[in-house]
Image (tube, coloured by chain):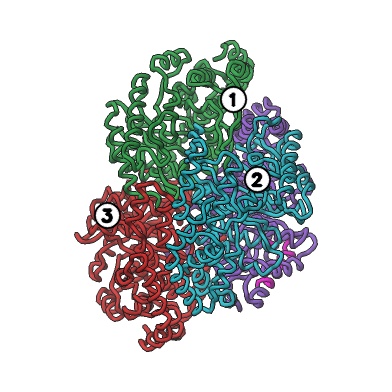
Chain colours: A cyan, B purple, C red, D green
């Protein structure tokens, strides 16, 4: 975390321009019949969870190029996440990944309190082998042909729930890489039956006020088939499990050209939208910064969410899930949290009464123009003012750079050497 | 239909080679522990329905280039379909498309009997406007915002059921183009609710022994969203309707790279696989000849079907659905029916006991090799012998060309001028 | 065209808000060191050509649903185009499509002058058969196996040049659908050799100050291979032809996920970028309204164009190419012209000096933030003020609707019945 | 390598069946006018290079699950490669990857001679950082903004040439991951200019009888843009460099749905096809076993190669490039080499005189049927007989398993622990 003087100094320099921009936008929105203060209030309350693994530099199967000051463990990670929240006031919680982040609950809670964070959904990991692990996940985990391997994966998920319960998490997120690389390697039906049987054991261990979030993904690490390949299979899982089971949508886990916002609408309609992993992608599960490639698509997702907001039971979880390979992860996460807020604010600006009218009249041109009117409004002054009033930074990145945080932690944390998978 | 002498003459010329090939294959399969006669018997019983619209030359939005002897209506179409069955013995039934094929049931039945065919699933059409139609489908049909338009579409589907009931059909296939071209043009959820409400009215009119087949498709004619865009939504429809509702899988209606055989497995597992529209594609819904682009994918679909065959309740409907833009449609349909049989025969050759063993052992290499052993076996002698013994032609295309059928009907049927949409 | 009183009245009602928005934006940009007037001047000079075929309602292979007042021919089309220019002041020229628009040059010139338009690139059509045509294009045109058919296509292109020369066009755009639907149908190499030979004959007939624009497209109407399938082949054509030959980029003609802005950069770098067909797409060559699906991608294309603007020889042609299936084509073209201008204005706002610095420092986060700063600025006041000062409408769509133009021409022009290809 | 007794014993058990299959196929082909011995001779001469890195277990960014007996370095790798050649007689050469395989040339040559192999193209690596490396490749190598980093990459490539010259290589293959993850991160044009400048330095160091092979790839590890993203850019590189520069086509490096065989034809036509990296893929650069996903596509590539074979100057290099994540790499490489031979043999069976006739007549159906006639012929007996007569194994996989090689080397080579990138 950084000294509040740095923030104050940075904000003081930017305040006059922000005031001017905010006032001008307020007047403009007033001419559109929108109260800027109401939008700001909603934005100010909005938060997205940060993934603990996101504060380290990511990589590909070809190589990983670490940066300076890589976090050495979950406590360093929580420090970095605390700083993100300190500057953006948009990321009040952290999502842990077990076993990497497994530490005594008391220590986790204490550190979280210290840095001003709470814990969001907890994530299990059965797509890697750990040094002390009895059964390998090379050929699967929850859906493995071997019963003992499946049980090991079930036990790990239950352990995640137990830890999560002690740190205030209310959801378990499961993503498995189980699948196959060759036609015939696995029997699709039997594999899915095994998955369902194992998942039911996990579901059975879920506290009453918890949600089981299952994540679908088209491919990678399996390159011919993946057991939970799309929202159709994910929906079947949630249906088979029960009311506490819902689907998690990662924006990068779909086939090319798929209309993701429509999947969001369908899952919402049938009560099975559980949450999001926000990121962006151009090719596959690229895990790029949210909104960096197709910001309009992100807006269209939030358009669905704002549409559904009036339903009081509708409360999907929001989390970032990105891989930061060429940027400072702290900067990417700050900007990404802001981009999520931006899409939310833009969606709030849509004139929904008019939109409904145009839709009913099949006035496609005016309907889409109405949506884009929300999107093309520059809501940055609203986001910045919400940050400022919440105690954050008008410009998180420049404030962060001014703080010298990265070089400070680089001095404390040993350098990590670059690595690579050695695969072409 | 053509004179049986033509067939006999053609078969006589090819018989010796076929016998030699069949005997050699029989000996080879015997060494693999497979009885060729059993495979031949299964192939001989296998049939795929022909689409009535398939015997006319297809086109694109850019142009349509008709061939000689285009059928003038359903009775010409049934003649062409009868010929396909006469030569291939693989296409015992025809699937009608209403309103194009709407004629008195007695006349349809009489003609079908004359040419040796029965009627498969009946298809409704609410993606075009007919000259006498009260409400336009420009903005949708079953999911239109206007209640009267929806009712018109419902009524049309019920009329299709009524006609179908008189000609022996046992299924109604619904595909709608309803969707949108612009973000915001339609409310995804309300549009789907309207679809479900309308579909329930159709479902309610279904005789007890009928199946409602709904077809999903990613895009086209709607280019931003389609109300039944994928198997996830299709599954929801079948679930909402009831036991008589199942999903139809058209091989060309998916997003790029999607694992179609896995969708087949999932729908089978949950009792919701209703049938197929077979074709092939490289880019989108190209409606190319079945097996012409990716024959291994077709085989993998049949691998799932053979896998599920032991379940006596499993009986999905099989239909070709192709657009023949540059070939003689009769030839394309004959070859395509043969390709479907080929994939079936290849899938029957897979050593399933070994496959299960390799799958249980996670021996991916041997599992996939076992599958491919079935695929790479040249089963043409089995297909040809089955045709011959059923009274068809060893080589349908050369026999058809020798018969002079096309020039004969070209003389009877007036030439159709080329047309084009005039759209770039 | 509509009475200027309608425009005046409409503008008067909107002027006060525009002034307020424009002033506020001017002050904001001033704080960013940008002179709003300079941006406005550039926008005001910017124009994009309208396709003559775009003012009629488009369709798909499944159906076409015409609207009221469909233009009866090129003179009606020019009237509609004139109106688009009257209201937007962003579309000073029209691109003709021959043979549809073939009329005596004097009449075309006279009508164009009347409606205040000039003629942009002229387009040939060899993907449809015309009633009086000797050789069919069913199996190709410039690349057909038959020499006489190729010559017919060459002659048609030369006739287009001749007409174009009389109406002030300076470019011929060639797009052919030549390709194949089946592996093996055509020999790729021989087909391309035939294309090159024929194209050279057309190139030889080109006046000195003309450009030959060739267009690539991945697929449709050919569904296995297309002779000019991508920019690689298009580049080879331009190289083989000579200095007057350049590549035209249609935004919807690429494989899924392709980075189009990079293709723009490559063609620019090697002096072979000839022009654009602007539109948008989600799945294939959807021909949706420009900027309606992925406005950021459009911006990134314009970012490349602005980057290259300093090169005085760089002058690619800009044209809309869309299919308006569910909107009033006039409205869609007006909005699309505005969207092109919007992307241009946003790209002009990018702080290029800073961008270069961040790129040199590999500061990916600040580089992309700098780009997006341009994109997220709401430049609508600039566009509207430029229109207003050029004599157009602040809000073209509402002004158009107020004018009653559509109902007026609907009364004059006979209704067109809906049609459909009849293909599933 | 394994004892020849094992091979003899295995072959003895399989010989009778092979003879029967081979004779039957010979008779069948004779009826088609094809001499089986001629096909066998061509197949027997055909070889594909094995990648040194391919004999180790591959992985993804999520995890790597090593198998038993992982090679400890290039000498172990050469042993494994020697065994592959011993059993398949289809992989006479190995392609090295530097710096991993960098060892004294004399030692490499000695070991290669010992295991009966030669060296194919040599591959440089500038997509990872090595421990002792002065400049990081995090932001690029040959196209880096920093001149010293570019020079380091150039020097490395020249060092590869120097080593290659001592071990009999005749080509350098360059693939770089240079690109960007964010719009704006890099200037496309300047980055490519830097690439070209650096590549020219490498090209200048090339011996006269060498070929420079450059490889394009759409994405990964860069997820927004890649400097050599497709064959268009790759062609420009080869054109800019000179006659010794050619393009390498990796089957998995293209956009979805792209017609790869057509790219092969285009590069061949313009003298710029340099070679292949064979593998298969369903989604992206999956590096699956050749022919495992779409064997017909592989056949269509070989159809182009056989088509061009008559040109005596046409001699592209053939190499496997795969990642074996769930199989024994030795088994996968043996099967893959066989699949490449299979596609070659099938392509040799195509009746090219008939094909040309059908193409000239636009008889699409018979043209494609002619191609598929080659494809659907089961050529396994030809491949097996060629192996047998060359001293290899009729069934390489079962012979290998019988040999106990894997457990033997597992005892000699220390176990490698599983690892994972820890990235979601």
Determine which of the numbered discs, if any, sits on residue A175 in the image: 2
Q: Which residue is mark 1?
A: D416
Magenta segment's dominant SS is helix
Classed neighbour count for the residue bearing mark 1: other residues with Cα under 10 Å, few (<14), some (14–19), many (≥20): some
Task: Quadrant for residue A175, please give it.
Answer: top right
Q: Which residue is mark 3?
A: C245
Q: Dot 2 lies on which element? A: loop
The residue under the point 31% across, 39% down is D147
Q: Is residue B158 magenta?
A: yes
| Same chain shared by disc 2 and disc 3 | no
Q: Nearer the viewer, mark 2 or mark 3?
A: 2
| Same chain shared by disc 2 and disc 1 | no
Chain letter of the residue beneath label 1 in the structure image = D
Does residue A267 appear left or right of residue A397 in this picture? right
Chain letter of the residue beneath label 3 in the structure image = C
Classed neighbour count for the residue bearing mark 2: other residues with Cα under 10 Å, few (<14), some (14–19), many (≥20): some
Q: Which residue is at the front of the view, A322 or B63?
A: A322
Residue range in magenta is B153-173
Labels in figure, total: 3
Q: Is residue B402 magenta?
A: no
Classed neighbour count for the residue bearing mark 3: other residues with Cα under 10 Å, few (<14), some (14–19), many (≥20): many
Q: Position of residue C266 (x, y in %)?
A: 33, 50
Q: CA distance from mark 2 to mark 1?
A: 26 Å
């Amino acid at each position: 975390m950084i000294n509040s003087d740095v923030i104050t100094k940075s904000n003081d320099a930017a305040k006059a321009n922000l005031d001017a921009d905010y006032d001008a936008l307020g007047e403009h929105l007033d001419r559109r019949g929108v109260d800027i203060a109401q939008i700001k209030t909603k934005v100010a309350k909005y938060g997205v969870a940060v993934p603990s693994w996101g504060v380290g530099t990511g990589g590909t199967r070809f190589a990983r190029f670490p940066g300076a000051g890589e976090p050495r463990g979950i406590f360093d990670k929580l420090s970095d996440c605390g700083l993100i929240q300190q500057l953006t006031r948009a990321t009040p919680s952290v999502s842990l990944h077990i076993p990497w982040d497994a530490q005594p609950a008391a220590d986790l809670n204490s550190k979280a309190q210290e840095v001003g964070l709470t814990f969001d959904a907890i994530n299990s990991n059965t797509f890697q082998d750990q040094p002390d692990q009895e059964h390998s996940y090379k050929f699967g985990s929850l859906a493995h042909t071997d019963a003992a391997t499946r049980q090991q994966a079930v036990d790990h998920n239950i352990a995640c729930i137990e830890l999560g319960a002690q740190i205030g998490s209310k959801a378990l997120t499961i993503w498995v890489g189980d699948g196959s690389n060759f036609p015939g390697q696995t029997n699709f039906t039997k594999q899915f039956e095994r998955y369902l049987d194992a998942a039911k054991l996990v579901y059975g261990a879920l506290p009453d006020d918890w949600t089981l979030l299952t994540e679908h993904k088209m491919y990678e690490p399996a390159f011919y088939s993946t057991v939970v390949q799309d929202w159709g299979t994910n929906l079947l899982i949630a249906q088979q499990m029960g009311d506490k089971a819902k689907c998690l949508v990662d924006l990068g886990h779909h086939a090319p050209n798929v209309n993701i916002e429509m999947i969001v609408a369908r899952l919402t309609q049938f009560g099975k939208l559980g949450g999001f992993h926000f990121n962006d992608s151009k090719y596959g599960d690229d895990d790029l910064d949210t909104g960096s490639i197709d910001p309009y698509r992100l807006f269209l997702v939030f358009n669905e969410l704002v549409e559904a907001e009036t339903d009081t039971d509708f409360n999907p979880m929001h989390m970032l899930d990105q891989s930061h390979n060429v940027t400072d992860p702290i900067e990417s996460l700050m900007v990404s949290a802001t981009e999520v807020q931006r899409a939310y604010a833009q969606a709030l600006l849509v004139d929904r009464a008019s939109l409904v009218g145009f839709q009913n009249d099949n006035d496609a041109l005016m309907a889409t123009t109405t949506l884009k009117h929300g999107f093309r409004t520059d809501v940055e002054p609203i986001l910045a003012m919400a940050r400022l009033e919440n105690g954050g930074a008008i410009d998180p990145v420049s404030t962060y750079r001014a703080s010298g945080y990265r070089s400070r932690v680089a001095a404390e944390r040993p350098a990590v050497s670059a690595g690579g998978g050695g695969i072409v």
